[in-house]
Amino acid sequence: MALLDNLLTLHRVDSQVRALRGRVDSAKTYLDAQDRQLALLAKQKADLETQERQLQAVIHNLGLESQAIQARVDKLRGELNQSTNDRQYKSILNELKVLETQKDEAAKRELDEMQRAEDTKKRLEVHVATTAERMKVREVAKAKFDECVKDVGDRLAELEAQRERAALAVPERERKVFDKVADETGGESMAEITVVDLRHREFACGNCNIEVPFEVYARLSSNSDAVIQCKACTRILHLAEENRHDPDKRDKAKFEKTRKL
Ligand SMILES: [Zn+2]
């Protein structure tokens, strides 16, 4: 078989392999995105829990502080009743005043911290609900991925073997060109030349529509082993069978056409 025919065969199998792989890949990408989301949610949950623990510790310490102040206040009140002179009395009163202010401040801070702890608790509850929802989405994504692998698996293995066989029929240099173009174009490695006007020798790339010189058309019509890439879109150019000057093929193509009419 001529090189371009082998390339066309390779192209057909290659694009099927790519389409199937694409299905598995996009299911995997979606599943991975869900896993990333869940990892992020787990991290946020750990942060919120740390924050909650820290707030509880602060609240506990403020409670102890208030108790200590209260104990001192109680003690001073007792001393106040037993004070024997005016100076001592005034001094105790002053300290009591300072302590009352400190007690108020500690109580206010405790209230603020309790409010923050309450908010954090609510955020954690919302977070748990969000995570549960995300887990459901992840389960669906996993089921879809498994189903896709199961559906595609056997067929993909079969096609990959076919692709390998088809690739063996193409010499290494041309195969490298093919693989490069296929990777760059997502599997659209071949483009058929469109005959715009045969009499005026006008031809175009069937993919990007850029003009193809007559010399390229002439070379391809007489030689099915020439690998010529489109100057604009890099695809490997080929001719429809009826435009090739390969006697066997042309006659066969003509025969097919007549039969269809
Ligand atoms: Zn092109």
Image (cartoon, helix red, strand yellow):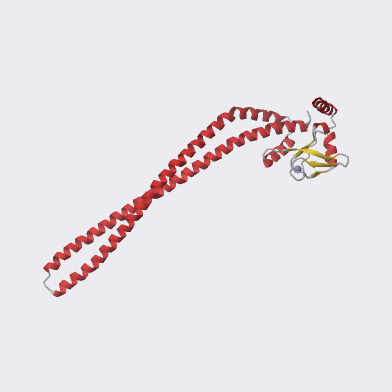
32 or 115: nearer the eye? 115
Judged from this view, the residue extending furthest toward the front is: 261
In the displayed structure image, the side of residue 208 where residue 34 appears, left or right: left
Q: Quadrant location of the C terminus?
A: top right
Up-down relation of residue 247 to residue 209 (above or below): above
Residue 1 lies in quadrant: top right
Residue 170 in view here: no
Point 45% across, 45% down: residue: 41
Left/right placement of residue 44 relative to residue 31 reads: left
Locate residue 259: give its quadrant. Answer: top right
Relative image position of residue 106 (x, y in whole percent): 28, 61
Q: How many marks?
A: 0
Dividing the image into four equal quarters, which quarter contains ligand 1? top right
Q: Is residue 199 left or right of residue 74?
A: right
Percent x, y of residue 16: 66, 32
Looking at the picture, how far across and down is residue 260, in whole percent? 79, 26
**Residue 112 visible at all:** yes
Residue 248: x %, y % from top left = 84, 26
Residue at left offset 26%, top offset 59%: 65
Q: Nearer the viewer, residue 120 or 248?
A: 120
Single out the residue that lies furthest toward the right.
199
Decide: is 113 above or below 40.
below
Q: Can you name the residue that lies furthest to the bottom here?
A: 86
- Residue sitting at 62 percent across and 33 percent down? 20
